[in-house]
Image: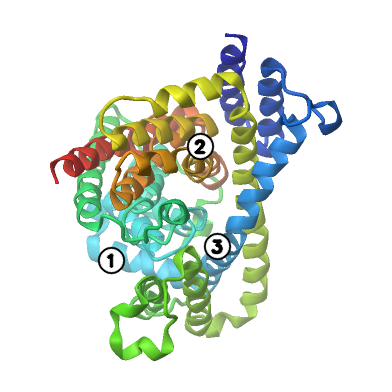
Amino acid sequence: MFSAVGLVAALALLILLTVRGVHILLAAPACAAVVAATSGLAFLPPLAVTGEGDFATSYMAGFTSFFADWFWMFLLGAIFGEVMAASGAAASVARGVVARIGLRHAVLAVVAAAALLTYGGVSVFIVGFAVYPLAVHLFREADLPRRFIPAALAFGSVTFTMTSAGSPEIQNLIPMQYLGTDAYAAWPVSLLVAGLMAGLGYLLLDQMVRRAQTRGERFEARKGDSAHDDHPHLPPPLLCLVPLLAVLGVFLLLQYPQGVPGLAWALPQQSLGKWALVVALGAGCLLALGVGYRARAAMPGAFTRGAGGAVVAITNTCAVVGFGSVAALSPAFQMALAALQGLPGDPLIGAAVAVTVIAALTGSASGGQTIALPLLAPGYLEAGADPAQLHRTVAIASGALDSLPHNGYVVTTIRAICGETHKAAYPALGVLTVLVPLLGLALAIGLFVLI
């Protein structure tokens, strides 16, 4: 009982600290220490009973394991996004989307621009920085409340794109190494679910914006907004799509190397799995450098920012994974895990509930998957769950309750990118990144049961 109270209190404290602006690298280990103290775990290895875990070792084991598994993806993804931004390619693609959708549909234009960049392989953190200036311009011209900009960015980035079949985001790749699947697992169902999430989410966002306008809310200009209009000469949008399409194309080829007989001589004999993304992002970086040749003087700085951003992004996630690793040792967590594994009915439902709960506890979709899958996947596969269906269920489930207020992406998008407060921006963002994915998850499971 004391362990359960400590686990819940630690999670609540983690949410509170991150909402208050405490850095996750400080908040996560501090809250993990609360879990350790209330669970009777030793804090240092010499104090631990032989064969039992301790706080310091367990936290760093989770931290370093995630870092080792995903560093190259974070590094190349961040560099790719920064090169796309420095070359003007990201802004060109975003403005091209805006030009075709129009100011009349300003909210849809922001969502579409974020979705296109995300599905093209640009890190969700970079997408926010790239699209935000265009969002400010559109919301100002349309006189829309700017507190909805974080919701529009997040909806386009971390819902129907991040966990869909074929997405090069790591939330769609982590299940591969545990389930033996590929990034396109259960794509027909994924396509239907993504369509529902995109349509329903946009309707909800549009209604929330309209209701706010009816109450008299308008765009509030801030100092520095004018700087977002100072764009250099941008490359043609169609040319700027080439690096994005290359990432998707190379990723697809290396997932199914035998699918193109004419290129069999140039491709590996087997799928590269998650490492296909490393090659795809590398190819995308080279093409993005070519597209941005006129901005070559800015490229060294882009590489530097990308490297720094990658370290920040991955260590933030590692910090949360470390918290989850310590939480996984607590008696309360083990009892909860046993209860989740023993849920009656379809294994997909049990997997969905388990991953959703663990992602909520860790505040990270990728962190939640990394903790949950090694523990849960073998049992669910033995119970007869289809690997492809389990992959898609886990991916979608991880992208729901992970978006609680303490999630690193949520904090970065609301505060660092958009300069808003949780009080103003999170209600809309929470509806779109928690409620909509939960409905999509229910649809996915329902369709799998009917198949």
Residue 330 image point, x, y percent: 61, 23
Instruction: Determine which of the numbered discs, if any, sits on residue 192 in the image.
Output: none
Residue 110 appears left or right of 85: left
Judge whether residue 146 can be spotted in this image. Answer: no
Residue 187 image point, x, y percent: 25, 57
Q: Quadrant of residue 253?
A: bottom left
3D distance between C-alphas at marks 2 and 3: 29 Å
Residue 107 image point, x, y percent: 30, 48
Residue at horizontal 59 percent and vertical 20 percent from the top? 331
Image marks 1 and 3: residues in contact by CB distance under 8 Å = no
Foreground mark, 1 or 3, reads 3
Residue underneath mark 2: 420
Residue at horizontal 50 percent and vertical 38 percent from the top? 375
Assess disc 2: are there few (<14), some (14-19) or many (≥20) residues with their C-alpha within 10 Å of its C-alpha: some
Identify residue type, mark 3: Met
Q: Which is nearer the N-term, disc 2 or disc 1?
A: 1
Observer-nearest residue: 78 or 163? 163
Assess disc 3: are there few (<14), some (14-19) or many (≥20) residues with their C-alpha within 10 Å of its C-alpha: many
Q: Quadrant of residue 356?
A: top left
Q: How many marks?
A: 3
Residue underneath mark 1: 99
Q: Which is nearer the N-term, disc 2 or disc 3?
A: 3
Assess disc 1: are there few (<14), some (14-19) or many (≥20) residues with their C-alpha within 10 Å of its C-alpha: few
Residue underneath mark 3: 73
Residue 411 appears left or right of 67: left
